[in-house]
Amino acid sequence: DAGITQSPRHKVTETGTPVTLRCHQTENHRYMYWYRQDPGHGLRLIHYSYGVKDTDKGEVSDGYSVSRSKTEDFLLTLESATSSQTSVYFCAISLRVFDTEAFFGQGTRLTVV
Amino acid sequence: SQKIEQNSEALNIQEGKTATLTCNYTNYSPAYLQWYRQDPGRGPVFLLLIRENEKEKRKERLKVTFDTTLKQSLFHITASQPADSATYLCALPLYNQGGKLIFGQGTELSVKP
């Protein structure tokens, strides 16, 4: 299995509180992604990174920010969690974007109450 | 914007039959297309990648076709088995957007013995 770890695996938080999810890789892959998965919507891209300090928005980036200060870590922050952000969050990594596969973490189940 | 559509309805087939899943895309001309499998509670796992000039690619009981005129990819599982039951997702890397990797919503396949 690719060396990719998400933490925490499960979290329950209250509306309005900040939350940070961590994705850690040991593969030295350049590209890292954060997705959320909800019933009926498949995987939707939140933010992605194409290098250290290089990030860009995905299709559902509102309410989320990211940081990548070193190759191995990609952090996703919910500045003020809302119930609509209750979801399963997946991190993925890829060596190159076009002709190689992406490897996914185990997912983080976040519940905002 | 680019969009990927997969059959939203679950596909139910009998063991031993061929399962065919469809992935349609719009507003884009991809050079590559990927297929992933996802089991409940787990992250997606890469299955196959096909290039625009390959038209068809095989791996054991899996076959993927890529029709750039129809803007469609078909994913076939021959001699299907109950263990093939899962959700299958297609994905497009967007070469004109610096590395975004977007997914369809997935099609749930159920193979009955």
Image (tube, coloured by chain):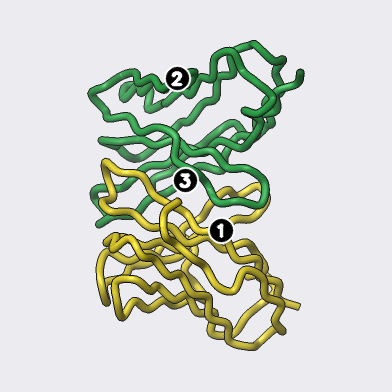
Distance, label 1 to label 2, CA atoms, is: 26 Å
Q: What is the three-letter code of the residue carrying label 2?
A: Glu
Q: What is the three-letter code of the residue carrying label 3?
A: Phe
Q: Is residue A66 above or below residue B71?
A: below
Residue occupying image coordinates x 42% and y 60%: A3
> According to the image, label 1 marks what residue?
A106
Q: Chain of mark 1?
A: A
Q: Can you tell which of label 2 and label 3 is closer to the viewer?
A: 2
Does label 2 or label 3 sit earlier along the sequence?
2
Determine crowd level at label 2: few under 14, some 14-19, many 20+ residues with C-alpha closer than 10 A.
Answer: few
Residue B60: numbered disc = 2
Q: What is the three-letter code of the residue carrying label 1?
A: Gln
> According to the image, label 3 marks what residue?
B103
Secondary structure found at label 2: loop
Determine crowd level at label 3: few under 14, some 14-19, many 20+ residues with C-alpha closer than 10 A.
Answer: many
Secondary structure found at label 3: strand
